[in-house]
Amino acid sequence: MTAGTTAPGRARINARTLRTDRWWVQPAVTVLVLVAFIIYATVRAFANGDYYAAPYISPFYSPCLAANCVPGSSEVHLLGSWWALSPALLILVFPLGFRLTCYYYRKAYYRGFWASPPACAVAEPHGKYTGERRFPLVLNNLHRYFFYIGLVFNVILTYDAVIAFRDADGNWGHMGMGTLVLLANAALLWLYSLSCHSCRHAMGGRLTHFSKHPVRYKAWTLVSRLNTRHMLFAWLSLFGVALADLYVALVASGALLDVKFF
């Protein structure tokens, strides 16, 4: 398939596009935000520290499965002593895989990074388009599997938010600002996951007659409503998980004092 500004079926105009608005702002902002998040997540992953301030644990490091985890952050050490690197390097592979293969983020980085196309009614500069049939973009077909794995992490982060109602000694009845931060992070991640196109397909896909499956139809309609705001939940959850990690890091390092409500 021939594409790009030199495609034979394109209108005979010299300009790249006839749009006069600032169409390049949105892809530029997308690039800046995603690059900033990647840099922040990479730095925090290799930092291997300031990720636990009882009872709060950073979402980047949960569940902490390595033997070198900060004492108290985890009681499960499935990896033994052979893993000497940061535990976050094991965790972030899956949520990042889910986001990178997400239908919305594909649109975001296709437009922002590959300029394919950079905006509506703006021809892409590439002379050839192969879609997602070749490496590495063919890996986007793994999205549905990352979706199911992501649900497991959502359950874990929800558990982290629940135990954040305990104090540093393990007694229930505590609530601080960190508790609210972790609760908000878990809620946003659930909204992002449940509004996913793969979730919508899991609810109502491969059904010939909705009338024969009323429960799945009801679930499909609810997910469809969330799906209309998938872009919003994608961005909110991205900022939410970064802010949750930052808050825990600041409290763990002593740079910020956690506000305790009771």
Image (cartoon, grey):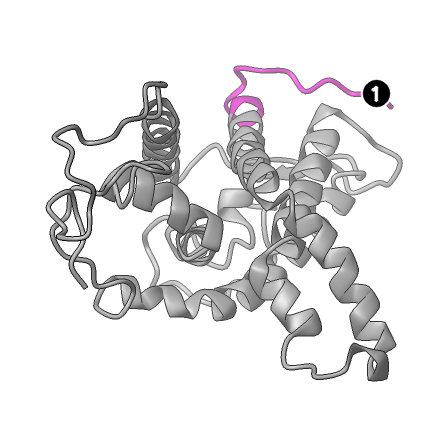
Report which quarter residue 248 is drawn in.
top right
Of 203 and 188, which appears nearest the observer?
203
Q: Could you tell whether 161 is left or right of 103 in the image?
A: right
Kindly identify the amino acid type of the residue bearing the numbered disc 1: Phe
Quarter holding the N terminus? bottom left
Q: Which residues are magenta?
A: 250-262
Residue 165, given in percent of the width and then of the height, sits at 80, 38
Describe residue 38's horizontal placement relative to residue 149 as left or right: left
Relative to 175, 5 lies left or right: left
Quadrant in which the C terminus appears = top right
Q: Secondary structure at mark 1?
A: loop
Does the stretch in magenta take in 256? yes
Disc tally is 1
Which residue is denoted by mark 1 in the rendering? 261
| The image quarter in which residue 201 lies | bottom right
**What secondary structure characterizes most of the magenta part?**
loop
Image spot of residue 155 (x, y percent): 68, 58
